[in-house]
Image: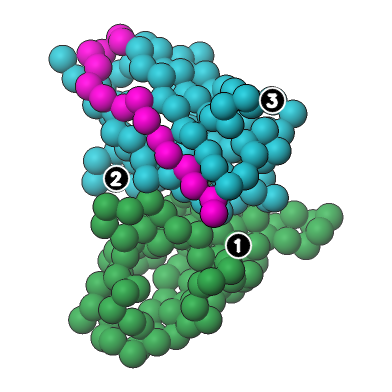
Amino acid sequence: DIVMTQSPDSLAVSLGERATINCKSSQSVLYSSNNLNYLAWYHQKPGQPPKLLIYWASSRESGVPDRFSGSGSGTEFTLTISSLQAEDVAVYYCQQYYSTPYTFGQGTKLEIK
Amino acid sequence: EVQLVESGGGLVQPGGSLRLSCTASGFTVSSNYMSWVRQAPGKGLEWVSGIYRDGSTYYADSVKGRFTISRDNSKNTLYLQMNSLRVEDTAVYYCAREGEVIGRFDYWGQGTLVTVSS
């Protein structure tokens, strides 16, 4: 199984500041035949299901604000929120869909400082 | 509008069985890849099982041989039959659509809570 490890486990950022969450996979999730990274990012607010933010490591889902961006390739990935808004408080998860079982990182709790 | 509504959760004793349902609207279940994902109380997300458009099925090792995923095309509904339940199966169970990309969960239901306890 591919193990996904996020850092940090929790993060406090001031409103309007940048937030950065990292994700490492135990093996590459880059599929060489199409040069796509099978990596997604979600956030989950209390009492709600997860919501897809980013897929293919850097493609923003429709309707997701452009302050959210993803980067990285192979085994190391980053989610960046360029200017933190109050509504961004949530737990953030990365997930690989390169192979089953699909696996998630342990989550990063993002709070306002 | 795409919607997923889960039902069937509840309290069950260890060793018991439960069947979860996920009724979809706004799209056709049989034309999409679909999965069940669970979340134990206060914990992270764990993929449980998936079904492809062609009907082939996949399971996490933790549930293989105990859980069965299926769908009823006439009812546009996804199911998860859970047998031999264990305390560690306690979780909120979400059904999720994978859309055009296998393994990428673009729509989620609100979830249904399964509690396994004596």
Which is more toward the observer, A65 or A21?
A65
Decide: few, some or many residues near mark 2? Use Cα within 10 Å; few <14, some 14-19, many ≥20. Answer: few
Decide: few, some or many residues near mark 1? Use Cα within 10 Å; few <14, some 14-19, many ≥20. Answer: many
Per the image, label 2 sits on a secondary structure element best described as loop
Q: Residue furthest right?
A: A33
Per the image, label 3 sits on a secondary structure element best described as loop
Q: Earlier in the sequence, mark 2 or mark 3?
A: 2
Q: Which mark is residue A55?
A: 1
* Amino acid at dot 3: Ser
Q: Which residue is mark 2?
A: B43
Q: Position of residue A47 (x, y in %)?
A: 27, 52
Q: Are marks 2 and 3 on the same chain?
A: yes
Q: Chain of mark 1?
A: A
The relative height of residue A70 versus residue B100 in the rendered view (above or below) is below
Chain B display color: cyan
Left or right, residue A103 beside residue B15? right
Image quadrant where residue A13 sits: bottom left
Tell me the distance, in whole angstroms, between the alpha carbons under discs 1 and 3: 24 Å
Question: Could you say which chain is coloured green in the image?
Answer: A
Per the image, label 1 sits on a secondary structure element best described as strand
Magenta range: B1-16
* Amino acid at dot 1: Tyr
All told, the count of numbered labels is: 3
Q: Which residue is mark 3?
A: B56
Q: Name the residue rendered at 35%, 12% in the picture.
A: B17
Q: Position of residue B102 (x, y in %)?
A: 66, 45
Q: Which mark is residue B92?
A: none
Q: Residue furthest left?
A: B118
Tell me the distance, in whole angstroms, between the alpha carbons under discs 2 and 3: 29 Å
Residue B41 shows up from this direction: yes
